[in-house]
Amino acid sequence: MEHLSPAAMDEFTRIRRDIHRHPELAFDEHRTSALVAEKLASWGYAVTTGLGSTGVVGQLRRGNSARTIGLRADMDALSITEASGAAWSSCHHGVMHACGHDGHTAMLLAAAQHLAVHGRFDGTLNLIFQPAEEGGGGALKMMADGLFDRFPCDAIFAMHNMPGIEQGQLVFRSGSTMASSDYATVTLHGVGGHGAMPHKATDVVVAAASLVMALQTIVSRNVDPLQPAVVTVGAIHAGQANNVIPATATLEISLRALDPQVRRDMEQRIKSLVALQAESFGVRAEVDWRQGYAVLVNDATQTARALAVAQRHFPAAQVNPNGPMLTGSEDFAFMLERVPGCYLFIGNGAGGQMGACMVHNPGYDFNDHILPIGAAYWIALVQDLLSPH
């Protein structure tokens, strides 16, 4: 396995921390994409900017093979105020890299430099730096701008750090791996009135309370117990005074599923349950359904190839061939609907290790010790899958 030199490690740790210090939200990654484009161009990549607004693609061709491979990293930050205490903490109040996209970008850049200088492969390498993963659907926007038409890929891969997993461990899973994410706003309309005379009103608060409990039966009674699913009511808004029955109430609901059919069934069941519950309380319901990210499904063949690379180049104890399904969501799922590939995880730290703080937490920081491991895996993957005949 090829390793980054200490000098390269220092350089890409500095780049990672610089990106961390200057976080940018979805479709506003101008500084980050400019840095990525400049680095790739300086190493000899053909660089395309502006895909999906702020996305960047670097392409490197070697030899005569028609084979192609795509590696993707995300670049956007989150609307969270940092509390990590790191010397390289965000200089933008209310914005921070709380999910490690700074590290993902730095890992792929480190691999890009090494492959440009030392890479032994025959084919075309497409490095995809994507904006707006955090709910913005940047993958969809890049594809709408012709990503895979302009840069065809036989297979595509991405990697995400994961706190709670031992530092540097590589985790693979074939099939459904991350959940879909859908959102619904339910608005209940009734007749307001005096709190002392409820019989002259139709109480949306009581209807909302009953609906919250009824929604919990969907997973327990309508979904196969062997199929993971989540229904979460994250917010209820109704009324302002203790002696006034409000005329409207709203519920904000988050839905997750790891099977496309379960996802469809949940939507139908929720809409039916909401309508019937509302009718039973004499109120009217409106459902605003917003489809989010798809179920992330790793292709069996490409996952087996990606796993074989890890097993060939890393100690057995460092490779988990059958990681768990996760109820978080990821818009790389849309790319996997177009191109077969694999989304894998790299442990950011567990227990008392550095990097064990969970993502989307104000105290989170990417563990720089895993940067060379992730880069080494990308290098091995490219050279193995595009090995010269």
Image (spheres, rainbow, N blue to C red):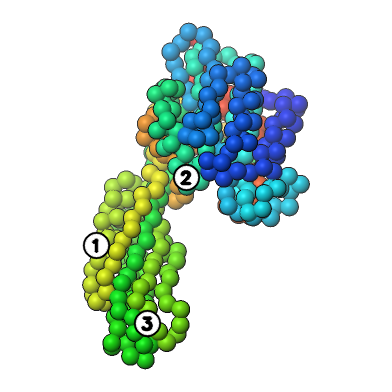
Please say if 112 is above or below 363. Answer: above
Q: Nearer the viewer, residue 136 or 163?
A: 136
Residue at horizontal 30%, vertical 55%? Answer: 266
Residue kind at label 1, given as amino acid type: Ser
Q: Secondary structure at mark 1?
A: helix
Neighbor class of circle 1 (other Cα within 10 Å; few <14, some 14-19, many 20+) is few
Q: Toward which corner of the image does residue 3 lie, by quadrant?
A: top right
Neighbor class of circle 2 (other Cα within 10 Å; few <14, some 14-19, many 20+) is some
Q: Where in the figure is residue 149, as x and y percent of width and height?
A: 39, 24
Q: Where in the figure is residue 292, as x and y percent of width and height?
A: 39, 48
Callout 1–callout 3 Cβ contact below 8 Å: no
Q: Secondary structure at mark 2?
A: loop
Callout 2–callout 3 Cβ contact below 8 Å: no
Q: Nearer the viewer, residue 389 or 35?
A: 35
Residue at horizontal 64%, vertical 31%? Answer: 35
User: Residue beneath label 2, please?
Assistant: 136
Q: Secondary structure at mark 3?
A: strand
Residue kind at label 2, given as amino acid type: Gly
User: Residue beneath label 3, please?
Assistant: 245
Rounded to the nearest whole Å, what is the CA distance between mark 1 and mark 3? Answer: 26 Å
Please say if 319 is above or below 125. Answer: below
User: Residue beneath label 1, please?
Assistant: 272
Residue at horizontal 24%, vertical 62%? Answer: 272
